[in-house]
Image: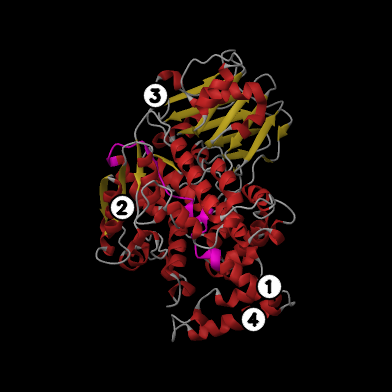
Amino acid sequence: MCGIASIFSYHRVAGPIDRDELRQMRDAMVARGPDGKGEWYSPNSRVGFAHRRLSIIDLSEQGAQPMESEDGKLVVSFNGEIYNYKALRTQLEAKSYRFQSNSDTEVLLHLYAEMGMEMLHELRGMFAFVLWDARQGKLFLARDPYGIKPLYYADDGWCIRAASQVKALLAGGKLSREHEPAGLAGFYLFGTVPEPWTLYRGIQALPAGHYLQVDDAGVSEPIGWCNVASIFVEASQTGLAFSKDDAVAEIHAALQESVKAHLVADVPVGLFLSSGIDSGALAGLVKDQNQPVEAVTLGFSEYVGTADDEVPLAQEIAQHYGVRHHVHRVGQQEFARHLPSILAAMDQPSTDGINTWLVSQAAAMQGWKVALSGVGGDELLGGYPSFHDIPHWVRRFAIPSMIPFLGTAFYKVASRLSAIASPHAPNSSLTNPKFAGMLKYGGTYAGAYLLRRGLFLPEELPTVMGEELAREGLRRLQPMAYLNQQLAGASQFAERAPPAMKVSALESSIYMRNQLLRDSDWAGMAHSLEIRTPLVDIDLLKKVAPLLTALRPGDGKHALASAPSQSLPEHIRNRPKTGFTVPVNQWLQQDKNLDAWKQIPALRQPSCPWARRWAYTVMAMNTGGL
């Protein structure tokens, strides 16, 4: 796990790169790589790589980056982990490739020499890298299928810059800070900036599962090489029949194999432990690998003695599996003290990630460099309420939503009624801000997903962004088209795939990718901690997706709970889904430094969800109130 930065002056008449700019980009990411730094420049000084290193695999200097091939024709700067690197190395050695290190980075170099960009299909892991091929005079940028590791770039027509963080690109001092309306609109719709947008016009995210190539002719469009929705499409078309028992047995084997792969490291690997099935099952699966388990749980002072307190059940799970367990409690005062550091580490605005920053801090206090997280279990195995709600809404509203203008008319009437009712009945369904959008959006999977996951509806954005900025942001973002693109693995996918697969594709490609995984990256890296996600693994998805048709709602999470040789206790397996909550609503009411939302009339309404207030507060603190 590292921080990477690169600059390529690709235009035929462009001069050498600015080395000071590259170093400033690199050193803005010290927390990503406190164990070392490096830089490399091409003979003509038109290409430069810089690197910050967090040593996880091959802790020696032989694993330092940027790394050159033996003949100097290939150079790579890599962020992430390749879990199957040992098997790949064995294959390459059989073809007479010689290795100077024990790192997975060197495997990337030789595998590229052997296969070119086709090598991406051989990699199992989380990764983002930049690679210079002097033989072809090309720069390659690539990113893993789920987008676990970030990679951002800026192209001004003369020069391309790339880095692991948006703020690193800005730290170079050469890029405009003009805000991107689509990024702003996306943030208010989803609580995070949806890729490929960022908060800045000149900076884009390389989409997950894509690569980019640059030569003196210019910058290509991102080229997709792996698509999560397409894997679900293939799974839905296999025609294979599985019994429930066979499917569960196959899922167990796939989970055990994924956890084993994610434990590959030359340093100890810890675990984030909550009271839920995902992290609890991981604790048991790690124990099954005959590896000592050490876990950390985050608790909040405000929740002591309530059902929202994660600590008691986490302690029970730890005892159940013989886990060495650490508990870290946080209260409002500690949160307020850390908030400036949290915002500084937050590479792009997010309404989530506070809990990950705090639990990562607790892990770092234990001296950890690597921690496993249960992110991804709900998306893969149908654990969210959205797996029930979205198909239900689509069935209920599909026909009414097709009647011209009915949805728009209902929205206008319901919005007026909601405004009238809000002061008198703040908790009624009528005053729910999304109630008005049911007929307009509820009849399609994309629209129903927006209702289920969205913070605001598109019609509401002027209340927090202003009319002009909201109009421009929605024009550029095209939110419904954006959502439908996540189901575009095949032309028949949206019509023929099982409902659970469609919801899983949406949850994995939007909420998990843009929020949970991105938050895990910036929040973990703020403490020089690598967060690994065994339940977010493309090999696991390929094995499990065809099995899902054999399961009924709820079976997937039960399969996860029973995957360890010693299953989770029954009362934990069967407790209702609660999610991990942070007492932000209480903090918003108590801390005067968090009252920016009070200047917006719509956010002061008694029926206003607290998440909307928090979103406006986060954006105000990041941008000054845009």
Q: Which residues are magenta?
A: 365-388
**Badge 4 density bin: few <14, some 14–19, many ≥20, Cα 10 Å:** some
* Sequence-wise first label, 1 or 3: 3
Amino acid type at circle 4 is: Phe
- Residue 214 colored magenta? no
**Is the residue under label 2 in contact with that under label 3 (CB below 8 Å)?**
no
Q: CA distance from mark 3 to mark 2?
A: 33 Å
Question: Given this view, does label 4 or label 2 mark the residue nearer the observer?
Answer: 2
Amino acid type at circle 3 is: Leu
| Residue 217 falls in image quadrant | top right
Residue 554 in the image, given as x and y percentages of width and height: 49, 62
* Sequence-wise first label, 1 or 4: 1
Residue 525 visible in the current orientation: yes
- Residue 385 colored magenta? yes
**Is the residue under label 4 in contact with that under label 1 (CB below 8 Å)?**
no
Q: CA distance from mark 4 to mark 3?
A: 62 Å
Question: Given this view, does label 2 or label 1 mark the residue nearer the observer?
Answer: 2
Q: Which residue is mark 3?
A: 59
Q: Which residue is mark 1?
A: 398
Amino acid type at circle 2 is: Ile
Q: Which residue is mark 4?
A: 410
Scheme of colours in the image: secondary structure
Which residue is at the front of the view, 166 or 486?
486
Q: Which mark is residue 317?
A: 2
Total marks shown come to 4
Decide: is 337 above or below 101.
below
Q: CA distance from mark 1 to mark 3?
A: 56 Å
Amino acid type at circle 1 is: Ala
